[in-house]
Image (cartoon, coloured by chain):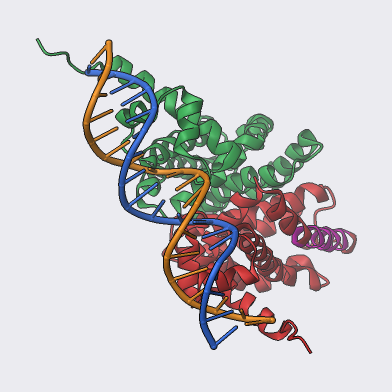
Chain colours: A green, B red, C blue, D orange
DNA sequence: ACCTGAACACCGTTCAAGT
DNA sequence: ACCTGAACACCGTTCAAGT
């Protein structure tokens, strides 16, 4: 009987490469990272690595998919609660903390820049994003129905703004390490509450 | 008398290279653009180009400086008005339009990703940014004093949020071309007004 | 089946040679 | 002073050879 492909090994080797690549990408950027460096960081030879990813681009795509799914996970807590405004106040410090990790911000920027020009990366990006946006939209709509959220606000605009802001915060954090993250987080949370509640405030 | 360096030519050649580079960077990304391509796009030989920029990195730095100064110009209209909330409503459609140009968004992402890892690029970035942030902060403070802006909001947080949002919008626009920019712009403007005015609304 | 590492084609940069 | 383009060192990828 011929030896057959070992799926278990295949999966763990891919994970091993992706971990190494994420590390290199955060430090040097996607396109300044050489295959040799990924080989070294994952403890594999070039020939071995190319068994698991046929090109550097395929590593980038798999990596982008993972990175975006982490972002979706970070934000998705907002949608689970019945009251998105209350949920925002509650989880924002932790969300903000996640977004403003310097490494995370760098990887977000790398992936976004790559997705803007590379169709395969963009596909991974979109798949992670579309569901998230729908959930955010639904949560805001529920908020409007329940009277927590300004009934006048445009749902599409609000979703667009929030997602742009979350990515923007991550990008910013990679560029200017702020001294007092906790204070900034609560200041931003306050502003977002203003934004969602509108001119009448919470209890009107 | 020995021939001396022609400063006029030097300046125009640098501009020529930067225009060509911006073009290539938007299409292919900074690090996927080859020097050969920049040479071809600017109509110069390798040897000639290297007279004006000693390395590819020096092109990137000069380019980043230019790109960021355009962003600052886009946003700076907000600061000139005595009433930042009114100014926002007035100029936001145009600001939004500028930010959501697809090419512009791509270049913003490229520059941000690069600045996150490259000290020389980051320096160019910071220089353009710091003054802009101070002006935004001053404008918001004036707004608070005049009663246009929620007196409770944290100035640092508001500046951080706005700048993160503007870059985030540019990044988003490079990733998802929206069908109805005008509607989106007015929806986002409404939300920003909510945010800055706070629970009491404009005229309280 | 899985792995190694030398070899090939290409890109950033240099430099001898031209005007 | 300003320019050309062939040449060098390095990176993405391949492939003959090993286990």
Q: Where are the magenta residues, as a range? A: B128-144
Horizontal arrangement in the rendering, residue B107 relative to residue C11 (left or right): right
B145, B1: nearer the viewer: B1
In the image, is residue B60 above or below residue A171?
below
Q: Report the quarter where the N terminus of chain A lies.
A: top left
In the image, is residue B104 above or below residue A121?
below
Q: Which quarter of the figure has residue B71?
A: bottom right
User: Which residue is at 39% across, 40% downward?
Assistant: A56
User: Which residue is at 60% across, 73% downward?
Assistant: B94
x and y, in percent, of residue B22 in the image:
54, 68
B134, B53: nearer the viewer: B53
Q: Report the quarter where the C terminus of chain A lies.
A: top right
What secondary structure do most residues of the magenta stretch adopt?
A: helix
x and y, in percent, of residue A134 in the image:
42, 43
Q: Which quarter of the figure has residue A18?
A: top left
In the image, is residue A12 above or below residue A164?
above
Q: Is residue A3 magenta?
A: no
x and y, in percent, of residue B74 in the image:
67, 70
x and y, in percent, of residue A141 in the image:
49, 45
């Amino acid at each position: 009987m011929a030896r057959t492909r070992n799926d278990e090994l295949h999966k763990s080797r891919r994970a091993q490469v992706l971990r190494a690549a994420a590390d290199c990408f955060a430090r040097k950027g996607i396109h300044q990272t050489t295959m040799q460096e990924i080989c070294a960081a994952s403890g594999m030879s070039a020939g071995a690595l190319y068994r698991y990813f046929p090109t550097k681009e395929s590593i980038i795509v798999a990596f982008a998919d993972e990175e975006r799914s982490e972002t979706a996970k970070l934000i998705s807590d907002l949608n689970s609660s019945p009251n998105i405004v209350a949920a925002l106040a509650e989880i924002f410090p932790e969300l903000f903390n996640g977004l403003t990790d310097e490494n995370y911000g760098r990887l977000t920027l790398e992936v976004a820049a790559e997705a803007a020009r590379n169709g395969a990366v963009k596909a991974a990006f979109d798949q992670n994003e579309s569901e998230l946006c729908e959930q955010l939209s639904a949560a805001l709509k529920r908020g409007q129905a329940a009277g927590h959220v300004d009934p006048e606000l445009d749902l599409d605009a609000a979703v667009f703004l929030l997602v742009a802001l979350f990515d923007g915060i991550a990008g910013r954090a990679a560029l200017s390490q702020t001294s007092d993250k906790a204070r900034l987080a609560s200041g931003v949370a306050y502003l977002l509450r203003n934004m969602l509640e509108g001119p009448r405030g919470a209890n009107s």
